[in-house]
Image (cartoon, rainbow, N blue to C red):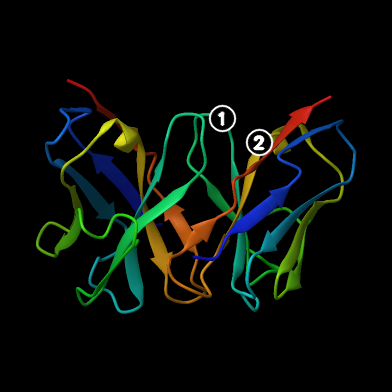
Amino acid sequence: QVQLQESGPGLVKPSETLSLTCTVSGGSVSSSGNYWSWIRQPPGKGLEWIAYISYNGGTSYSPSLKSRVTMSVDTSKNQVSLNLNSVTAEDTALYYCARYSGHHWTFDYWGQGTPVTVSA
Amino acid sequence: DIQLTQSPSFLSASVGDRVTITCRASRGVASYLAWYQQRPGKAPELLIYAASTLQSGVPSRFSGSGSGTEFTLTISSLQPEDFASYYCQQTNTYPITFGQGTRLEIK
């Protein structure tokens, strides 16, 4: 059973860089067919896809965030990471890590989410 | 981007009711449409993928249908644990997009 655990700073100042980590257990981040994604949910609102990284390191970013986002993978720690720079209050959200299945192109495993508030 | 519009945005129903939620896409997405359930304070869970295929472990009272631009999620007989928010999601065309959500509450 794949499990994902997000971790992050909780509070970030405007204009700074948000860095989040997702630790994967029960599966390998480098297994063929696995893609790892970040999705966020502002308070009281819906879901927004941010990015994904593939098992071989290929990335895809949402056009609306592409200029500010970077995803990476650390196979030695079985982790994926997200960096979002130049944050504003609009980046305040619950950030989820999810496995994006290459089998049927859906998010089949999710972490519990990590809250991020952007405030001075 | 492909816009997904869910209707209704809010639905009030009773235990045992049959309910249907619709998801309309601004352009065709073939059958690359999934449905998720999100209970309060929890992460979303995958219910249906490929428009009509039930994810393993999901009760059979849930069903999905549609292709192209119009899709439906039906719950045949509401149970207390079904009162939650529901989201559709497409992966036919990047970027991946979600509907705005449907909140299902107890009448």
Mark 1: which secondary structure?
A: loop
Same subunit, tags 2 and 1 = yes
Q: Residue furthest top?
A: A120
- Of the pair A56 and A39, the residue shown nearer to us: A39
Residue A58: quadrant of the picture: bottom left
Q: Residue at x 47, y 77 (%)?
A: A103
Is there any visible trace of residue B57 in the rendered image?
Answer: no
Rounded to the nearest angstrom, the CA distance separating label 2 from label 1 is 7 Å
**Which residue position is annotated with label 2?**
B84
Mark 2: which secondary structure?
A: loop
Q: Quadrant of the N terminus of chain A?
A: bottom left
Image coordinates for residue A113, horizontal then vertical, percent: 36, 39
Chain where mark 2 sits: B
Three-letter amino acid code at the position of disc 1: Pro
Image coordinates for residue A31, horizontal then vertical, percent: 28, 74
Chain where mark 1 sits: B
Image coordinates for residue A44, horizontal then vertical, percent: 51, 29
- Of the pair B78 and A49, the residue shown nearer to us: A49
Residue A42: quadrant of the picture: top left
Q: Residue at x 64, y 66 (%)?
A: B26
**Which residue position is annotated with label 1?**
B40
Is there any visible trace of residue A7 in the rendered image?
Answer: yes
Marks 2 & 1, CB-CB < 8 Å contact: yes
